[in-house]
Amino acid sequence: MAQRNDSQRLESNYMRSSKSRSRNKNRNNRPSGGNIINRVFDSSGPDGKVRGTPQQIIEKYNQLHRDAVLSGDRVDAENFAQHAEHYTRLLAEAQREVEAKREEQEEQNRQRQAERDRERQDRLKAQEAAANDPSQSDQPDVVDAAGEPESGLVDTPEEKPRRPRRPRKPRTNPDEGNTPEAAE
């Protein structure tokens, strides 16, 4: 009876560890978005974890492959070679995506520049046409007799400046008369 419990315990532990492994598996293998080229990965290879960017992981697995070949272990050598190939493909795919985005960006920049060039040419043509056609060019302002440009507005009495009045001459009294004799 004790053996049965031990085997059941081992089986349930195995089941638990595989479940937790499958839960963690998707977290590190294929990143969702971001720059894969510079991203740091944790690779669980046959010889333990290898951590680094895809390029660093490829170099590490290639070194492990060479070491396994030199030691005569063909199984490990093949395993390391396959791990290196996986990260090589991952890196190549990421580089293709980066290149495609760069080309798309360059094409958009070329289109924007071509549009700006067309608009500039249209403005230059319109300016040349206006310079050659007097009816299309700006007309000079009309100047009234005083030499000031005419604004097109009508002067109203409130707007006209008032002239200062001249002082009045004193009135003479009719009784006194205006004769030179009266002044004496």
Image: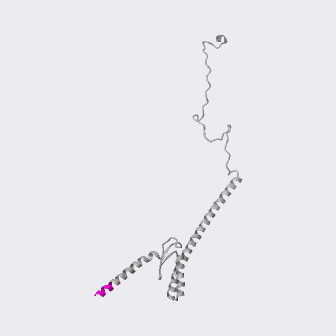
Question: Is the residue 29 above or below the residue 117 in the image?
Answer: below
Residue 177 in the image, given as x and y percentages of width and height: 63, 13
Occupied quadrant, residue 184: top right
Question: Is the residue 159 above or below the residue 130 in the image?
Answer: above
Q: Magenta span has 83? A: no
- Residue numbers of the magenta segment: 1-8
Question: Is the residue 175 above or below the residue 164 in the image?
Answer: above
Nearest the viewer among 183 and 110 is 110
Occupied quadrant, residue 123: bottom right
- Residue that sits furthest to the right in the current view: 132
Relative side of 44 to 4, left or right: right
- Residue that sits furthest to the left in the current view: 1
Relative side of 136 to 9, left or right: right
Q: Report the number of numbered marks.
A: 0
The prevailing secondary structure element of the residues shown in magenta is helix
Which residue sits at x=53%, y=76%? 56
Residue 33 in the image, given as x and y percentages of width and height: 50, 71
Which residue sits at x=39%, y=78%? 20
Q: Which quadrant does the N terminus fall into?
A: bottom left
Relative side of 21 to 6, left or right: right
Nearest the viewer among 55 and 166 is 55
Q: How is the image coloured?
A: one colour
Residue 28 in the image, given as x and y percentages of width and height: 46, 75
Nearest the viewer among 14 and 35 is 14
Which residue sits at x=50%, y=73%? 40
